[in-house]
Amino acid sequence: QFLQQSQESLSIKKLELWYGSHHSYVVEPPHDEQRQEFERSFIDNFKPIIKLLKLKQINEIDELCISVGENTVTDEHAEIIHQFITDFNIKSLSLDSLDLQLGDKKLFNPAQNIQTLRCESCFPKHLTDCPSIKCLELDWIERTLEDCQILSKQMRYLTELTIRVGYDADRLDALLSVFPPSIKILRLNISLEEAETKVLGDFLSKNKTLLELYCVGRIMTTHQCYINLAYGLRHNSTLKSLDLSKCFYSSLPESIKIWANDGLTNNNSLEILNLNYNKMDIGDICLALQTNTSLKTLYLICNQLELSSIQSMIQMLNVNQIIQEIDLFYYDYENNSPAINDDSIELLGKLLTKQKTLKRLSIPLVFEKESSIKELANGLQSNEGLTYLRLGFLNERRDRQELILLVHALEHNHTLKQVIMERYEKINWVFWDQDECGIVPYPEDDDETKQRYLIQSNELTTAYAQLIGKNQTIDNLTISSLVTDIGAQVIAENLTKNKTLTSLRVQHQQLTQQGCEYLQRALDMNTQLTELFIVNLPNEIKQTFDEKSNGRNPIAKCTIFRSTYYW
């Protein structure tokens, strides 16, 4: 219908076609009736699309993505896809969840110009006749070493290879040896065993093309494992991204220290380091990175955040003027998430006062002293480097006034573009049906306490609204207070003054039709805001909201109203 009704000439860069279930966790194969329905719909829809595209004089599409779920691609299907690839000169092809046993041979031939082939949850075995393919990505597949050998013999023209999780090769060196030296392995995403760290270290020390390495599994189990990996990093000069999340054992602090000092200090190519979910002391890692001259992004989610660790991180940032992003953010309400406390918060505030190179900061906080939040507020107010800030307040109830202090401080910051300040509270979800839900904060409280809570929430919402009205650099903001109709009115008044905000997210709300009307009128006057996310907006209000948006706001077609359910 879209193609038929379009009056203008079209230029399509990427076309995605999805059929049936494409979830890898679907266990039962489709029964005969489902399979027949798929085959009919695939053929009945694909051919008219080809015809219409030709009618619109579209002769070239850069990228084609096809997913058929748990269905089998027959020879007839493959011929249709092959025709599409040939007719529209497809250069990049992505195949998702296709069983290529039957239709594989029909897909590829010398006449095609496919240069990049991405296969997710499927494995091509018949690429002999497609010499144009230079870049191959194999993603999330469980295949044997024999399959890789078959593929390597066929891909004699390949120059770039990305391997992702799941090969059943007994050893890493056996897998890597399958592919000829002419192939540049750019990305390696693979499950490892402890014994394979030596092979990995040797591979890193000699390889001159690998850009990204993602390791899966608790591979760093012995002191020798750390030595092996440190050796590889020390002698590698091309690796840009290293992901070792969930790979370490925190019971080997001395080994971690040696690995960091030997591997990270002496590596000058690594730009992204991911050490998430290792539950280890990050102090030695940070100290080792003081003199590193290449690292820009450091992910340390779900690790130990003791005062000594934060002191080491602060020391690193004072010395290292290259690092631009640090992410410590993690929250698990049930299991006492790691967070920095008062002394660390004060150190962070003092650092931000003079730090200009750090661009993105995500960090969880737990505080008892108002003085620590004042120090952080002063740091954020005078900071001239940050463009992205995400703060998570794990205090359960006492942080509303302190949050107001921080929000007011941001009024004077002139570099931040995106701000997310999240509060985690016990909220009772009340479901009326599957399309609606309501929020009752602290249901065990008496009426007086609940009323005081709403008053304080309105005060915090007012602070956010004033931030919207006064700050003219933030373009993406999350409001974490409970927004009522009163708060919506104040937000709406300040939205009309704002000239930079393009995305606004209301995290918690108790809005009625009246509150939505306030926001709607503000949208009619604000031509910058293109995204409004209202979490858990009841559907009957959402429907009215959408109807009133249509045709009134000049950017109505870009405005998004979402009813999203968070568990």
Image (cartoon, grey):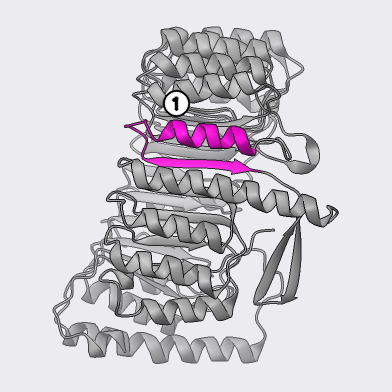
Q: Is residue 316 above or below residue 404?
A: above
Which residues, given as a range, are shown in magenta? 400-423
Residue under label 1 = 380
Percent across and percent down for residue 22 are: 56, 70
Rendered view: 547 above or below 452: below
Indicate the position of residue 378 as horizontal and vertical percent values: 47, 21
Q: Residues within 10 Å of mark 1 (few under 14, many from 20)?
A: many
Nearer-the-camera pick, 373 or 121: 373
Q: Inspect the magenta stretch and tell me whether residue 546 lies in it.
A: no
Residue 329 shows up from this direction: no
Relative to 316, is 195 on the left or the right?
Answer: right
As rendered, which of 146 and 88 lies closer to the eye? Answer: 88
- Where is residue 334 shown, x and y percent of the image? 80, 42
For the C terminus, which image quadrant? Answer: bottom right
Q: Is residue 158 left or right of residue 299?
A: left
Query: Label 1 amino acid?
Result: Leu
**Residue at left offset 61%, top offset 12%:** 283
Work out which quarter of the rendered image holds the N terminus and state it: bottom left
Q: Residue at x 59, y 86 (%)?
A: 35
> Which residue shows up at 44% across the image and 26% down it?
380
